[in-house]
Image: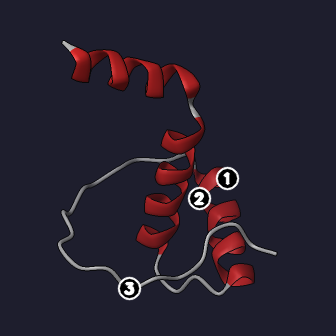
Amino acid sequence: MPIVKSVQKQDKSQVRISIDSKTLETIKQYCEWAGVNKHDEFFEEAAKYLLSKDKDWKNHISQKTLS
């Protein structure tokens, strides 16, 4: 079962990135397998997942909001 799913969203910002060719090829294969039609959806969902799981990041943000 794929972790990243294709979802339509509004209010997007455009960015340009460089990524290792082998990693990009693997991401393309994953997107094809998971039915994700746009690579930007993969990156957005992967970033959300990472940010939701990183305990140090969550601690940093909670400390920042208390200040």
Residue kind at label 1, given as amino acid type: Lys
Q: Is 47 located above or below residue 64 in the figure?
A: below
The residue wearing badge 3 is 8
Mark 2 touches mark 1? (CB < 8 Å): yes
Q: Position of residue 55 (x, y in %)?
A: 57, 25
Observer-nearest of 57 and 12: 57
Residue found 65% across the figure and 87% down from its top: 35
Left or right for 31, reference 67: right
Inspect the image, locate mark 3, and give the three-letter code of the amino acid beneath it: Gln
Task: Indicate whether 30 appears above or below 67.
Answer: below
Q: Earlier in the sequence, mark 1 or mark 3?
A: 3
Residue positioned 48% across, 50% down in the render: 47
Q: Earlier in the sequence, mark 3 or mark 2?
A: 3
User: How many marks do you count on the picture?
Assistant: 3
Secondary element at image label 1: helix
Q: Quadrant of the C terminus?
A: top left
User: On the picture, is 7 further left or further right than 3?
Assistant: left
Q: Where residue 38 appears, x then y in whole percent?
A: 46, 80
> Where does label 1 land, which residue?
22
* Residue beneath disc 2: 24
In what quadrant of the picture does the N terminus appear? bottom right
